[in-house]
């Protein structure tokens, strides 16, 4: 279940007592992959294509100053 993986990776990033499995992974990179996968699933539920989602991400980056 993807939300559990997301939760476990967040522990690796934000927890003061990081679990042992955090030592061998790049948690921020893995969390980004999971978040992208979640975005695609949600976009699919709303009938948004991958291209439209990318356009939305670009717009959000512009608006946030990235």
Image: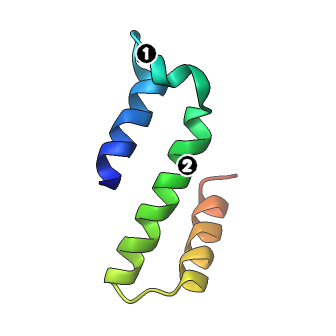
Task: Please report the residue visible at 61 percent of the width from the left and 70 percent of the height from the top.
Answer: 59
Badge 2 marks a residue whose secondary structure is helix
Residue 64: x and y in percent read 60, 54
Q: Is residue 56 left or right of residue 35?
A: right
Q: Which of the 4 quarters of the picture holds residue 54?
A: bottom right
Residue 38: x and y in percent read 41, 62
Number of callouts in the render? 2
Image color mode: rainbow
Nearer to us in this view, 16 or 2 = 2
Task: Please report the residue visible at 46 percent of the width from the left and 16 percent of the height from the top.
Answer: 20
Circle 1/circle 2 CB separation < 8 Å: no
Graded by Cα atoms within 10 Å as few (under 14), some (14 to 19) or many (20 or more), the crowding at tag 2 reads few
Above or below, 19 relative to 62: above
Task: Please report the residue visible at 38 percent of the width from the left and 89 percent of the height from the top.
Answer: 47
**Residue that badge 2 annotates:** 32
Quadrant of the rendering where the N terminus is positioned: bottom left
Q: Is residue 61 left or right of residue 21?
A: right
Q: CA distance from mark 1 to mark 2?
A: 18 Å
Badge 1 marks a residue whose secondary structure is loop
Nearer to us in this view, 45 or 61 = 45
Extreme residue in the right direction: 66
Nearer to us in this view, 58 or 53 = 53
Graded by Cα atoms within 10 Å as few (under 14), some (14 to 19) or many (20 or more), the crowding at tag 1 reads some
- The numbered mark at residue 18 is 1
Q: Is residue 64 left or right of residue 42?
A: right
Mark in the foreground, 1 or 2:
1
Residue 24: x and y in percent read 60, 25
Residue 6: x and y in percent read 38, 44
């Amino acid at each position: 279940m993807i939300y559990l993986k997301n939760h476990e990776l967040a522990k690796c990033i934000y927890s003061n007592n990081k679990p042992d499995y955090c030592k061998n992974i790049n948690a921020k990179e893995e969390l980004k992959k999971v978040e992208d996968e979640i975005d695609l699933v949600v976009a699919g539920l709303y009938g948004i294509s991958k291209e439209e989602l990318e356009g939305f991400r670009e717009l959000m980056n512009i608006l946030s100053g990235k």
